[in-house]
Every structure is written in structure tokens, then in C-alpha cells.
Amino acid sequence: MKIALASPLYPKSIDDAIAQLQKLVEDAAQQNASIICFPETYIPGYPLDIDNAKRSTPEMLENALTKACTIAKENSIAIILPMDWYEDEVFLNVAFVISAGGEVLGYQPKVQLDPSEDNLWIAGKGRKLFEVQELKFGIAICHEGFRYPETVRWAAREGAAIVFHPHFAGSDIEGVELKEWCHVNNPYYEKAMMMRALENTIYFASVNYATKYQESATSLIAPDGKCIAHQPYSKAGVLVVDIDPELATARLAKRFKADEYV
């Protein structure tokens, strides 16, 4: 099946995020992708100044989710939409899964927050597996996939053929312009992507914003740890790639002796 990984520009507003989402979803649907994933907290956009971040209202977020559901239905494509969310007045970092029919199938909350995020979001609880067109998948959000490999291994052991990894790493203001994927001098992020796939024998789909100074590329890694494709640094667009779920055997993940670590 074909999957799509979206690399939007950093959104100027929720309205801008929805406008970009519509275009990228349409592009993916025209290429016959079955599902498209966006970067971490795409709505309203990962806070660039996390200590002074302003929270969107519940109404603003609910309205954005409703619009995304309509876009999914109009284009007959499933969407993984990371966003801020209120659940019983608790402020969470989540990734919604919307079906091709526009139905919300649920969300994966970010359980392992980066220390810098402790004063903004509350850590969620529990891990979930989702299914779209018989493709079983998990979601690990940013810090989880980079520094908590257990999040990916759990999904693999539960039957996921792929783990989607929405994240944010980079800046539009300062940094180094990367030139070569997984260069020895690049930040470790792309190397971690390879390991999450290789150590579990599943696909790993990592999705980032197209900022000027990206620290990691939007990338699809095969179960053998090789990079199948990646979006050029700083180039907004959608990466559509074929995957074969049968190659995701989770052989190494299933050999994990969990009882030895209790």
C-alpha cells in the first residue's frame, strides 16, 4: 500500500495549518496514498518558545479537528493529525487517527514528555494500536521514538507493521543547514530512526516540519534499517512511498524476553 508523510512549512496560524493540510492531503490522495501523517502538534504548531507558549482554546482545536475530518472524507484518505487537545480539562499532546470516511478512530497521547515540556502538557497514559485498510500501526511522538525505544517495541510486539513518528526538530531562525541524510556530523535523530526499524524489524515513518534549519528529514525506514526515501531538507511537500506490510515481521521484537526485565 502507499503511505504519505507530510512535510509542511511551520504554520503561521491554525487557519494556515488547515490550508496546508488540505493541499498536502489532496496531493497524497492524487497519488493513491491510503494514509498521511503530519508532524508533532501540527495544530496549532509545536511551540517555538515553549516556556511562553499560548494555549489554543478547546473550541479552536475542536473546530480544526472537524475540518480535518471533512478533508479526510472528501479525499477518501486516512489522516494522522498530531495536535494539542483537552481531555477533561487536561492539556495533552496527542496524535489523532481519522479514517478515510472522516471518522475519528481515537488518539495516541504523548506519554513520555521531554523535560522541557513538563510545564506545558500533561503526560498521557497508555499505548494504542490502530488499523487502516488492514494496516496495523502504532504512533510514537517525538521524544518517545528518539529516546524511549520501548514505545516502538510495544507496537511491534502487538502486531504493528509500521510505527508513525510525528516530531519536531529544527528551527526557522538559527542552526545548521543539513546537506546529506544521516551524515556522521548530523544530529543523532536519523540514526535513531534507523535503529527503531532495525531493532524491531518493522517500518518506521518519521515526520518533521520543513523548517530552514531542519535537524532531521521526514524519512521512511525499512524493516532492515535502510532508508527507503526521505524528503529533501527544508522542502515542503508530501513523500508518498509504497510499503509491503508482509516484510514487517517484527521478528526481533518478538524475540524480546520481557519477563527478564520485570
Image (cartoon, rainbow, N blue to C red):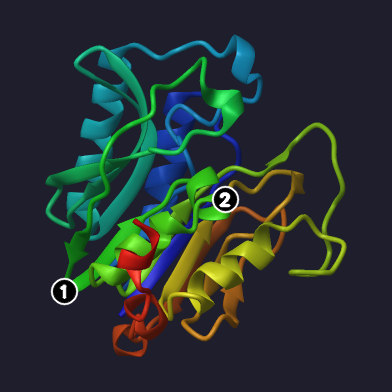
Of tags 1 and 2, the one toward the viewer is 2
Q: Quadrant of residue 137?
A: bottom left
Q: Categorize mark 2 by other alpha carbons within 10 Å: few (<14), some (14-19), many (20+).
A: few
Side of 172 where 132 appears, left or right: left
Q: Position of residue 77 (x, y in %)?
A: 25, 60
Amino acid at pointer 2: Arg
Residue 200 visible somewhere in the drawing = yes
Secondary element under disc 1, as helix, strand or loop, is: loop
Query: Which residue is located at x 31 percent, y 59 percent?
Result: 138
In front here: 136 or 101? 136
Secondary element under disc 2, as helix, strand or loop, is: helix
What residue would you read off at disc 1? 134
Query: Which residue is located at x 66 percent, y 63 percent?
Result: 190
Q: Position of residue 142 (x, y in %)?
A: 52, 46
Amino acid at pointer 1: Glu
Q: Position of residue 188 (x, y in %)?
A: 73, 58
Task: Relative to 69, say whether 150 is above or below.
Answer: below
What residue would you read off at disc 2? 147
In front here: 193 or 22? 193
